[in-house]
Amino acid sequence: MTESCVKKLSCTLLDAITDKDPMVQEQVCSALCSLGEVQPEEMLCACEEYLRQHDKLAHPYRAMVLRTMEMVLRNHTSELDKDTANIIILLASSEMTRTKELVCGWQQAASSVLVAVGQRFINRVMEEMLSRFQPRTLPHCSVVRTFASLAVSNVFGVVPFLPSILSTMLPMLGMAKQDELRVAFCSALQHFSESTLEYLANLDQAPDPTVRKDTFATDIFSAYDILFHHWLQSREPRLRLAVVEALGPMSLLLPSERLEEQLPKLLPGVLALYKKHAETFYVSKSLGQILEAAVSVGSRTLEVQLDALLAALHAQICVPVESSSPLVISNQKEVLRCFTVLACCTPGRLLAFLLPRLDTSNERLRVGTLQVLRHVINSAAAQMEVQKPFILSSMRLPLLDPSSKVKQAVVQVISAMAHHGYLEQPGGEVMIEYLVQQCALPPEPQPENPGPDSKNLSADGVRAMSIRTLYLVSTAVDRMSDVLWPYLLEFLTPVRFTGALTPLCRSLVHLAQKRQEVGADTFLIQYDAHVNLPSPYAVTTRLLVVSSNPYLGDGRGAASLRLLNILHRSIHPLLGRRWETTIPLLLGYLDEYTEETLPQKEWEEKLLMFLQDTLATVSDNTWTCQLSLEMCKQLPCYNGTPQEKHFLYKCIGTTLGAASSKEVVRKHLQELLETARYQEEADREGLACCFGICASSHLEDTLAQLEDFVRSDVFRKSIGIFSIFKDRSENEVEKVKSALILCYGHVAAQAPRELMLARVESDILRNMFQYFSTKVLGVKVESKDPALKLCLVQSTCMVSRAICSSAQASSFHFSRKAELVAQMMEFIRAEPPDSLRTPVRKKAMLTCTYLVSLEPALGEQARADMIQGCLHSVMALPPESQGPVSGYGTRP
């Protein structure tokens, strides 16, 4: 595209910029920018010529053209020649000062063009600006603002001009009466001071490395005198804020003796603005710079003002932060910066002020104090080093605060402490325990109308933050490795930390891997050196049992199994290779399912097979007995989680089944019978499952222990205690009997068939019906507890099925068969004919189907009566949806 074409096209587009449609105006500007990317000089010259020739073009359109020019200049200043730059500078300067009235958009656009050209042609821009900045004549506001913007955008180019600018500006300050011009002067002085400080901080890169702070000190103090003693007293809030913004960086350039002289008035003057302005960010930012200046000169005045400073700053940090207010958030950052300055120069005084305020019961004050504490721990680490014991001891009361806001603040303090070596000190373990407690917080019900920050300020928010913090300090803070390992293992077994199991396991896995990578001892856990650690049996039991409900707590099953795997040498030296094969298979199985689709029974069977395989691999009776002892000890821990308690009973049965010591087996079975909570379904069924699994290896001992229990004083005393409360006695005694009957059913189902057949009539069935308080031969069975009846039917069904599944079933002469059939039919007839309320009818019929196939055969009349009774019981029943089934607390 030729240059003339670009110019013509630019002119055509510029003619369309006055279109009334804003969309058209926007598209015109976009097209001009595109042209400027191709031929920047041609496009810029076309815009300059257009504005010059269209003198009466309204200022909004002139501002659009200037903004378009500025966008092109931003990327193509390096391509401008000197003549074109000069033309643009003269245009922008003229546009900016054409009218004395303030037309912000137009004048700002022109100023931005000058700032963009000043990136390369700073001398020419400054020359033009100084021509409009003459002594004893108040300048145009936009000229002063342009000086300020140039100082920000081109520090090295502007600072050499500052002595000349300041000498011209100082007399003008006394002449300026309009607030708008005063605000512009304040902004210029602020940016001049900031640019000077940046220049001095980078003298090695500066064009004139001989520039010194005292070059500006006298002029800056003269300006300071007017701003602080006169303009700061103005009633115009905007001017006061502009003054205070300027005072901060200016104070860093004041001569030391002048600053020390002014501080007794300056600090109270700035602090007083907190009460006058809602936008306290500007006050705090300036105050931080003044404090830095005071500290840099070793001011003695600061100590006198310290109490007032701390009180004012603390009040600011305790203002609640609204997420919708960026200035409030920024103010808090600046206030914290002030605290850092004070922490570095007077750490003792600062903590003497802060730590007592942790004892307050006021949530807002406590949260604010904790925020400051966390900040100074991070930002003034060296100064806080000797204060660590005092800081740790001061956390006692905040750790007890139930407020979610306080808890979040405490967790943040603990995170800072972890990074700076506090948790290695005496008392550090209390902080770690607190962190784990917050990881274990239970989920909170969601409010009906949650606010945008309700999640963060709830128990769930505290828990999420604590989990992130625990994992962070475990994985990213190297110094914490020896603090957390193996200490975190202590939290695996106590019930109150159950909710924290997943993050605990993940952190422990990472810590263990790190120790292995650096060649730690083969045995990761030295039990002799850490007496409070849970034993390998306790760890194994706990992690195995919680894995039975694997998706709870963000996947604690997988996390527990991974921890077991990495601890294998500390659990038992022989488990390494075996677990390296079996545990990944279990983890892979979990990956195939979700909480909704997992076949729970199949999963528990896999875990029990894993336990059985583990016991076989260890093959050590002492180890097995210790594991069974620990499992029994942990049973009460699961009183509130019936599914896991039921599974633990199965684990106990599996472990006892692998034990070779009959004495240990009998002892544990006796304790289980004596301590079971018979009113709880999980205990009754769990106990029965445990006895059944144990009977697969110890039938004789299991049956003997059941009979011994019934004859024992414990059982008789229980009956006696129950009988005192006549309303409760029958129910509670029958719960015990229900459990015992279920035990016999499971024993029959699990025991070796050839051994079971020899005992089925003489021991198993006899005791079952004895506990049911009935005689079988021709005597009608009555029971007030339908659950007891159901247990009897269920166990009888299990016994019958076990006999049928025996290889000797065809030759087995079941002498009590007819009695059992008659008993089942009596149960069936006793069921209400018009409703299906319990599984008794179904279980009894199923029992009859097993019994019919056994010898001796039933007589024809008995068979006919059985069939007729079953049909009569079923045919009158309504559809299933009209007859809800209740299990009376037992499983069908």
Image (spheres, rainbow, N blue to C red):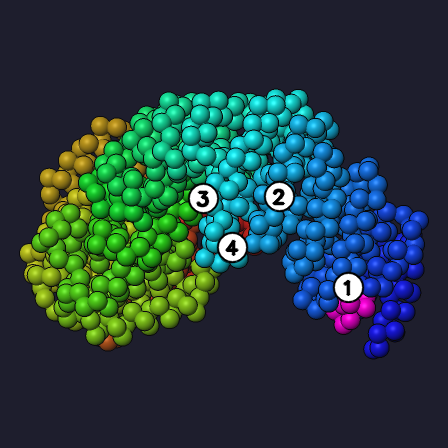
* In-image side of 60 versus 116 (left or right): right
Q: Which mark is residue 208?
A: 4
Q: Nearer the viewer, mark 4 or mark 1?
A: 4
Which residue sits at x=55%, y=35%?
A: 220
Looking at the rendered structure, the secondary structure element under dot 2 is: helix
Which residue sits at x=53%, y=32%?
A: 221
Q: Nearer the viewer, mark 1 or mark 2?
A: 2
Which comes sooner in the sequence, label 3 or label 4?
4
Q: The N terminus lies in which quarter of the figure?
A: bottom right
Tag 1–tag 2 contact (CB < 8 Å)? no
Q: Which quarter of the picture shows residue 193? A: top right
Q: Which mark is residue 164?
A: 2
Which residue sits at x=29%, y=51%?
A: 645
**Residue to which mark 1 is pinned:** 84
Which comes sooner in the sequence, label 1 or label 3?
1
**Separation of marks 4 and 1 at Cα, in angstroms:** 28 Å
Residues rendered magenta in the picture: 37-43
Magenta run includes residue 160: no
**Separation of marks 3 and 4 at Cα, in angstroms:** 58 Å
Prevailing secondary structure of the magenta residues: helix
**Separation of marks 1 and 3 at Cα, in angstroms:** 63 Å
Question: Mark 3 is on which residue type?
Answer: Asp
Magenta run includes residue 40: yes
Which comes sooner in the sequence, label 4 or label 1?
1
Which comes sooner in the sequence, label 1 or label 2?
1
